Amino acid sequence: MKESSDELFFSFIEYLQIEKNYSSYTIEFYKKDLEQFFLFMKSQGIQSVQEVEYLDARLYVTELYQRKLARSSAARKISCLRSFYKFLLREKHVTENPFTYVVQPKTKKRIPSFFYEEEISLLFKACDQTTLLGKRNIALLELLYATGIRVSECTGIRLKDIDFDMATILVRGKGGKERYIPFGHFACEALQNYIHNVRNELMKGKDEHSFLFINSRGGPLTSRGVRYILSKIIETASMTRKIHPHMLRHSFATHLLNNGADMRTVQELLGHSQLSTTQVYTHVTKDHLRKTYMNHHPRA
């Protein structure tokens, strides 16, 4: 019996969750992209995903362009559908992938936004270390900058993942991949102070759990909570620019490369599977070198 499009949709989402171990955030994008494609199928009178042909795929891509989507958004949607049909092909629900030969729009490689070292210092100074939450915030900020971990990785850290003797932390990244990342004495001191003097206080009378970072009510800190904390720090520091948590990750990588770290090491620390993903930071470092040269060379 041939499965319906909805059944194949749920099978694919289950595959992403179990086999690919994608985050809930990534899976939401896949769901939305597939739901939009199903609406397109309905408008074209296509009854099931098995009926979609190459010309239908081309027509859908044309529609994406007509909607004037950002190239990165269009590329993501095409990639999603290519993966969907690759899965259907593997499971023998279709005989060919209609999106195999669809050309994806080339996306511009954006230069990552990052903080200069002076700006990082301002952020640290903006944390009120006389309060419990201020001490938590400085520990959070120190760890994010010291390790370059993603916010989703940070909120998943448990107490047992930290090895203070070796000054390393176990991080679970995309696809469940694990890596150990070292951290320096600033982060070490801030974390120990937070764990012994802050976390224990905030957890009094609350349900015990092992997540490292917690909110004011003793529950695990969420990604949204991290964004809120960082926005408040920016506000206190009187910095006009907007912040997103990835800027600390970008700053981590940029500052390492500017100070002589090799690309392969930075790749491993960031948890990038491809070196090309890390190489985007060379644009930043080249710009930094050019500015340094122009400012300091006597005949620049």
Image (cartoon, grey):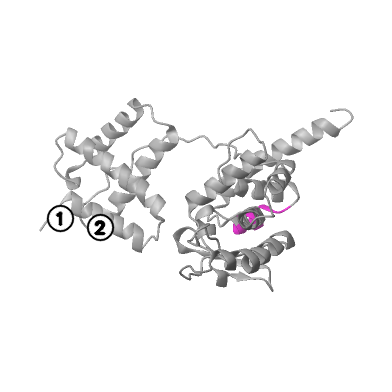
Task: Report helix, strand or loop for mark 1.
Answer: loop
Q: Nearer the viewer, residue 290 or 96?
A: 290
Q: Is residue 196 left or right of residue 290?
A: left
The chief SS type of the magenta part is helix
Q: Which residues lie in the magenta part?
A: 261-269
Residue 264 within the magenta-colored segment of the rendering: yes
Residue 96 lies, in percent from the top left, at 24, 49
The kind of residue on which mark 1 rests is Glu
Q: Residue at x 15, y 52 (%)?
A: 4
User: Is residue 209 visible in the rendered structure shown here?
Assistant: yes
The kind of residue on which mark 2 rests is Ser
Label disc, if present, on residue 35 of the rendered structure: none
Q: Nearer the viewer, residue 30 or 48?
A: 30
Please tell me whether residue 111 is drawn above or below residue 181 in the rendered image.
above
Quarter of the rendering occupied by the N terminus: bottom left
Residue 149 lies, in percent from the top left, at 58, 55
Please tell me whether residue 62 is drawn above or below residue 196 in the rendered image.
above
Q: To which quarter of the image does residue 53 belong?
A: top left
CB under 8 Å between discs 1 and 2: yes
User: Is residue 89 visible in the rendered structure shown here?
Assistant: no
Residue at mark 1: 3
Residue at mark 2: 11
Q: Residue at x 48, y 67 (%)?
A: 206
Residue 172 lies, in percent from the top left, at 51, 63
